Amino acid sequence: MEVAMAMAVKVLLSLCCVGACGLAVYLYHILWLVPQKVLAKFEDQKIGGPRPSFPYGNLADMREAAAAAKAARASARRSGSGGGGIVHDYRPAVLPYYEKWRKEYGPIFTYSMGNVVFLHVSRPDVVRDINLCVSLDLGKSSYLKATHEPLFGGGILKSNGEAWLHQRKIIAPEFFLDKVKGMVDLMVDSAQPLLMSWEERVDRNGGITDIKIDDDIRAYSADVISRTCFGSSYIKGKEIFMKIRELQQAVSKPNVLAEMTGLRFFPSMRNKQAWELHKQVRKLILEIVKESGEDRNLLSAILHSASTSRVGIAEAENFIVDNCKSIYFAGHESTAVTAAWCLMLLGLHPEWQNRVREEVHEVCRGQPVDSRSLQKMKNLTMVIQETLRLYPAGAFVSRQALQELKLGGVHIPKGVNIYIPVSTMHLDPELWGPDVKEFNPERFSDVRPQLHSYLPFGAGARTCLGQGFAMAELKILISLIVSKFVLKLSPHYQHSPTLKLIVEPELGVDLTLTKVQSVCTKRGTAI
Ligand code: HEM
């Protein structure tokens, strides 16, 4: 009996050993050999990059460079560099490793995070081909998909192939120009609480006040997107917005374990927080769905599509919830952050602020802003375009080769993630001229930038479908603000671009406000 037991234990141990060895070989294969094979294919094409190490690739180098950049920023803040020393190039602060590697390896190089291989591309011919490619074989990058799952699920922002095409066809018409024109009054209404509260603060403080503008601007863009998405249920929509912002914070750091292994259900503190928020947001959205009546809004278009597709209830609910969350995130965050950067730049450049104020005055002549007057605001359009060039909210246009592809003469193996650093294209002196790091909206006055040099709204088939909506929303807010207030950058302002899914001012934007007393136009001075 004892002998049999001992034999059984031996067999079991041997099986465990074989299993453990098999697992080790398998892990070594997927974590090291597979990415090495992909990197070798690029090396054959003379495309190199920093040497990865096992098992995290170049992650350690990236963390080290990011920590050094953070320390340098903190020390600059302690020495009080303030508003005067602003350099309009967020790359050294936000993406220091890419800058280092670009200098070493040129405009196209490889690197890896864990077993995920990336191709970093700022070579114009390759970027142009990515822009022109409409094939479903070029999809959205799946890197961070596991980390961001609670925020985006299978919604339009992250999906690929036929599923993405279906969603794009449903959502895109809701943002066509005629629809956007019909939303102008709604956007003007949404700006009123901000304008009234700022006026009240200026009056209360004897005609001049300092304001950290970020929360008020976020509230404006949340109000706009809530009304657009949810019509009369927009108050509940705002509650969703608060939770989505919390969710964004909860998933803003990559979950490396989940990305490398697919183990996204590990109950870590952060995961548990994200799941709980996801559950709450889902409940709120489905409550609105139940309450929604005859309203015509984005939600009703999504609902209609879900109810006419031949899918089960759970799948239809996921479709609704994931797309509401995606539009909510896409629609309010980048617009609010762009408005904050734009007002910072106008505070820094009083000559452009005056030009915009005069233009608004001339175009509107005391009448409320409408879609026709918005179209006539050329200086304001140029200022926003220049803001988006210097401070593009999306740091990358990210893609993945879902099949082997050839772009700009480069063979890209299946599975490789392609990242285009947007600000590197926007700050290329060869494409934009020697004053590339200066705020000069005039550069947009006559020439249209080339396809590959200007990417604030992304590229090609996946380009932002809310860009007309965003431009209208930005123009309305900024024209209303500058027509009422004179803005100056506050002495408290600290330049602090940081990457939290999008590039935002970490310490906010502080402005000093006074009321506009008079406006000098070509026709004379007016109040
Ligand atoms: C200044 C404001 C905005 C900026 C800078 C911006 C930027 C972007 C960028 C960079 C992308 C990715 C494009 C790509 O991968 O090629 C994107 C996608 C998207 N944006 Fe925007 N966006 C803004 C406002 C909005 C608004 C207001 C909405 C809707 C209300 C919106 C809806 C979307 C959607 C649905 C997508 C996904 C498109 C797809 O994958 O098919 N965006 N946006």
Image (tube, rainbow, N blue to C red):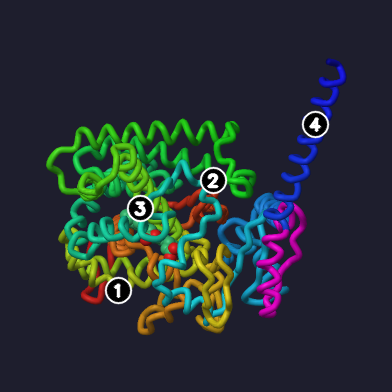
Ligand 1 quarter of the rendering? bottom left
Callout 1 amino acid? Lys
Kindly indicate the quadrant of the structure image that contains residue 65: bottom right
Which of the two labelled residues, at mark 4 and mark 2, occupies the earlier sequence position?
A: 4
Which of the two labelled residues, at mark 1 and mark 3, occupies the earlier sequence position?
A: 3
Marks 4 and 3 sit apart, C-alpha to C-alpha, by 60 Å
Is 297 positioned to the left or the right of 147 in the image?
left
Determine which of the numbered discs, if any, sits on residue 147 in the image.
Answer: 2
- Mark 2 vs ligand 1: CB below 8 Å: no
Contact, mark 4 vs mark 1 (Cβ under 8 Å):
no
Residue denoted by label 1:
378
Which of the two labelled residues, at mark 4 and mark 3, occupies the earlier sequence position?
A: 4
Asked if one can make out residue 75 in the rendered structure from this viewpoint, the answer is no
Determine which of the numbered discs, if any, sits on residue 331 in the image.
Answer: 3
Callout 2 amino acid? Thr
Residue denoted by label 4:
11
- Image quadrant occupied by the N terminus: top right
Determine crowd level at label 3: few under 14, some 14-19, many 20+ residues with C-alpha closer than 10 A. Answer: many
Marks 4 and 2 sit apart, C-alpha to C-alpha, by 40 Å
Determine crowd level at label 4: few under 14, some 14-19, many 20+ residues with C-alpha closer than 10 A. Answer: few
Q: What range is drawn magenta here?
A: 33-61
Callout 3 amino acid? Gly
Q: Which of 392 and 256 is in front in this view?
A: 256
* Foreground label between 3 and 2: 2
Residue 138 magenta: no
* Foreground label between 1 and 2: 2
Asked if one can make out residue 495 in the rendered structure from this viewpoint, the answer is yes
Is 508 positioned to the left or the right of 155 in the image?
right
Name the residue at the top extreme.
1
Q: What element carries label 4?
A: helix
At a point 27% along the width and 36% down the height, the residue shown is 235
